[in-house]
Image: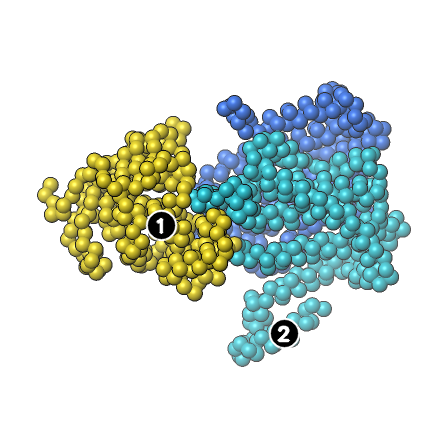
Amino acid sequence: MANPIPLRTADNATPDAVVEVRDICKRYGDVEALRGINLQFERGKLTTLLGPSGCGKTTLLKIIAGLVPATSGQVIVNGRQVTGPGPERAFVFQDFALMPWATVLRNVAFGLELKGMPQAERHRIARHYINEVGLSGFEEKYPHELSGGMRQRVGIARAFSVNADVLLLDEPFSAVDEQNRRKFQEDLLRLVDKERKTFLFVTHSIEEAVYVSDRIVLLSPRPGRVSQIIEPAIDRSAAPDVIRRDKGYLDVVEEIWQGLRQYAE
Amino acid sequence: MHMAASPQKVGATGGAGSGSSSIVETLADFARRRKSFWVAVSLAILFTAWEIAGRVPISFAFPTFLETLSALIEMALDGTLLPAYFITFQPLLLGVAVSAVLGIGLGIAMGLSDKAEWLLAPVFIVLQAAPMAALVPLVTFVYGIGLVAKTLAVIMLALPVIVLNSYKAVRHVNPSLVDMCRSFQGTRMQQIFKIVIPDATPVLFAGLRLGIAAGFIGVMLAELLITPTGIGDLITYHRSVANYAHMYAAVASIIAVSTLTLAALQYVELRFLRPEKRRK
Amino acid sequence: MKLFGIKIPMMTSLIFWALVWEIVGRMDVIFLIPPMSSIIAAGFGLVQTGSWQNATLITLRTFVLGMAMAIAVGVPLGVAMGRFKIVDNIFGLWVNMFVSAPLSALVPVLMILFGLGETTVFVTVFLFAVWIIVLDARAGVMQVPPSLIEMGRCYGASRFTIFTKIILLSALPEILAGIRIGLIRGVKGVVIGQILVSIIGYGELFELYSRSFDMERFWALTIILFAAAMVLSAVVEHFEKRIEYYAGAR
């Protein structure tokens, strides 16, 4: 099929891999969730794990985070094998995972609090990132006083404040309404550009994946395997509204949909 | 008497609203806005029914509401009620305090450790479902009829429910918050003290309230069964001399006191744990 | 718990505790704790006596009657409270108060009103069980999803049909949960009532055995009672699980 977008199927080693996933398999009892996953993630890039529900994309992300042990295979981050959570990785949760009894400030500073950083210092850092995600003035509010979108901004600020190299985002915008979601995607791109970190992003929205990603890993379900890797080379210097109407953007969305439609019920 | 007070308040709120509405409408409007109105109505209905039933009378041993009320006031003024409560509250407070410390401790241990769960959970499941009252006579064999025996009776009834609620509270802690703490390399201790216990607090408090309610049942059982003291003595004594109004007053007062205690605890809980109580 | 990779069922720890009891009993530490084996032996002897059978019959009769009354009153009242604001406003205060009130203090009042007999125990069972049944039935009715009721109206169901086929069925899981807790409370009620009245049923037997320091029979009776309470609660729980599937899908 002729395609105007330069698509590349990349499975060979990349030079500057921060995260390397080698032969990961995961079984839950008799259910095979993931089979033979091999992936590399480059520094400063945003990679999306995309697939239908049940393809194990969240499981893979949690294995990389060290929250879930793999049945076999290895995850290597910065040249060291992962045995559990580590300071070079930070996780953003689908359900935000904010402590309802703590203020925004304490929630954002929580990662630093656990490291034993003095209060004044961790609050200074937390305030910086609260400002960065656009929540200035909400430091003393409690999570239940914020909208879904604002809560996830707290979750993202918390992940940034520990200064990890790798950010793992598990469907971070799935509980956010469509308008805020678009704003979020634009903010995320700005942060990727600014912070120069490695982002691993899980979503089930094709449009979202194409809009934010440097690279998209398509997973197929039962058991989860890598079915395709797509690099949508979209000019991100253009205005968001222009991108969303760009022919290249729309073609990639269509291409992915053609690959995934066989899994739709 | 409660009814007499409400029309005046209705007039005040009705005036602030629409001027032309009828009394029925303003009354309905007031009832919607003020919960206290329904508390008054509901109290008035029961007290009126009580008064009528007492006047019929449905039984020679059924005093009217007003007789009971005056007996209560009499006991409050002649200095029998307060000392009785002083005596009743000693085993109650001691027992609830011991049950709370021990129960929350054991419950959290069971929630955190599989071994503690295996060893203790079945025992407390049985003890909570079982009629522990049957064992109250036993404590008198060992500890006689004093404060220790009564305190033990309170603990026997209050402890299982506090243990099981604390255990459930810990087991139902939001797993996503625990994952979050792990992802930031929180230690096991940090996980327990910064995530598990704060997240379990509302359910711990609910268990405490149930424990106090059970403790009241226990202390009354002890005072009626082991040896008459405190409020139990008032009930037993006035029953033996056929002074039914006083007996009813003592029973009604202990029920009212337990209700107010539980309501006060809930108020404290809502007030100091406000951010998390508003979740959901 | 897992031991050497094998999952050990939780309730097996009761066997462990029974063994501990047996050892403590054999060591003759205190007359209160006779060996478990002799308690069980006494239990087999006990169930053959006429006094136990008679007491069981009385206990069961008052319990069943009290529970039937509590369900017959509690469920309709709870449903009415869930459906009609005015009923809720009038009864809410009392139901919430009595559900956690020290009802043991009320038994002496019942004793003078209804005499030292089965009626008092029957009323005690009713009073212990009814309030939680009311509260749970109310909660069940109140959390029927409005969209289900709207669906019924869209397809032209009458008010009566909506009530019987949507509201009641939808509230069934909560109603059953209330009845289960009510049963457990009812067992406590029947024991507290009988112990305080102390001349009928198990209350009389407990009084008899504890006065004569017949600890084997005392514990045998206690274990029978505890086991009955557990079995009862397990039976209703099993029944609840069978309808849980649609409570979960809601």
Q: Nearer the viewer, residue C83 or B117?
A: B117
Q: Which residue is mark 1?
A: A172
Indicate whether B186 appears above or below B34.
above
Chain of the residue under label 1: A
Comparing labels 1 and 2, the label whose residue is closer to the camera: 1
Q: In the rendered structure, which amino acid carries the disc numbered 2?
A: Lys
Residue furthest left in the image: A2
Q: Residue at x 63, y 74 (%)?
A: B9
Name the one closer to the observer, C40 or B209.
Answer: B209
Q: Chain of mark 2?
A: B
Q: Which mark is residue C182?
A: none
> How is colour applied across the structure in the image?
by chain
Q: Secondary structure at mark 1?
A: loop
Mark 1 is on which residue type?
Pro
> How many angstroms separate mark 1 from mark 2 (CA)?
52 Å
Q: Colour of chain A?
A: yellow
Chain letter tied to blue:
C
Which residue corresponds to the image point at 79% horizontal and 31% vertical from the top-left?
C205
Q: Residue at x 50, y 35 (%)?
A: C242
**Quadrant of the image occupied by residue B68:** bottom right
**Residue B44 left/right relative to B82:** left
Q: Residue at x 76, y 53 (%)?
A: B254
Q: Colour of chain B?
A: cyan
Q: Where is B81 relative to B165, above or below?
A: below
Image vertical order of residue B110 relative to residue A159, above or below? above
Q: Is residue A259 left or right of residue B114?
A: left
Residue under label 2: B9
Across and down, in percent, residue C94 comes to 66, 55
